[in-house]
Amino acid sequence: DTGVSQNPRHKITKRGQNVTFRCDPISEHNRLYWYRQTLGQGPEFLTYFQNEAQLEKSRLLSDRFSAERPKGSFSTLEIQRTEQGDSAMYLCASSLAWDLGSGTDTQYFGPGTRLTVL
Amino acid sequence: GNSVTQMEGPVTLSEEAFLTINCTYTATGYPSLFWYVQYPGEGLQLLLKATKADDKGSNKGFEATYRKETTSFHLEKGSVQVSDSAVYFCALSVSGGSYIPTFGRGTSLIVHP
């Protein structure tokens, strides 16, 4: 497996347009996370899936944002009516989650999709 | 709540110099601690991790020790190379819940030949 992949790598759009990003996780990983990263900041959590279920969404994820993972494999993140403030790097990560008390969930990141809203 | 504080960058060093990037944290519960590295235009790569107090994570010459008494996880390398130039992120996640990590703001490292 070659790791987490994201497409497209770059997207330039005009304000008000809709955009959709795709993430393909590492094949055996059951958790998939979306983050947003702006310049000079660490990744900010948006949402995550365990298999096909979306288990948590951040308050950062406004109504214009929607994410899906229909078959528990790849995921899409759609932004409707984009705004200039949506310009950022959108990162996807996946993990093979396990919880054994002192266990840990190590996430592996994709290269990101850089969105520029004009 | 959980938080991670990293030293502000950029950190500028000459090749073969000793590197320390400070990271301190606050957490509810018992966190696992991570260092990620991000090269320009790329996503984050896991560099090393430690899951309990006094554990030392190490990889590619980098080391960090989980210090519960000082709530720290400082990143060190004995001799940096130009290729180590990148942004380094400290992060924590708490087991028993969603494991959603909390990241620091990142520290930029610039290594000159």
Image: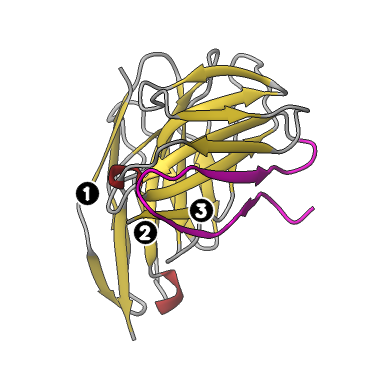
Which structural element holds mark 1?
loop
Range drawn in magenta = A1-28
Q: Count how many numbered circles sit on residues in the image.
A: 3
Identify the chain of the residue marked 1, using the numbered disc in the image.
Answer: B
Identify the chain of the residue marked 3, using the numbered disc in the image.
Answer: A
Disc nearest the viewer among 2 and 3 = 3
Residue A42's spot in the image, x, y percent?
Answer: 35, 44
Image point (71%, 38%), residue name: A74
- How packed is label 3: few (under 14 Cα within 10 Å), some, or many (20 or more)? many
As shown in the figure, which amino acid type bears the numbered disc 1? Met
Q: Which mark is residue A43?
A: none
Residue B82's spot in the image, x, y percent?
Answer: 40, 78
Instruction: Answer left or right for B15 relative to A28.
Output: left
Identify the chain of the residue marked 2, using the numbered disc in the image.
Answer: B
Q: Nearer the viewer, residue B16 or A94?
A: A94
Tell me, yes or no, if residue B53 can be seen here.
no
Image point (32%, 40%), residue name: B104
Q: Which residue is mark 2?
A: B87
Q: Is residue B82 above or below residue B97?
A: below
Q: Which residue is mark 3?
A: A113
* B83 falls in the magenta region: no
Distance between mark 1 and mark 3 Cα atoms: 27 Å
Q: Earlier in the sequence, mark 1 or mark 2?
A: 1
* A19 falls in the magenta region: yes
Residue A104's spot in the image, x, y percent?
Answer: 59, 27
As shown in the figure, which amino acid type bears the numbered disc 3? Thr
Q: Which residue is mark 1?
A: B7
Q: Work out which quarter of the rendered image holds the C terminus of chain B and state it.
A: bottom left
Q: Residue furthest left?
A: B8
Image-quadrant location for residue B53:
top left
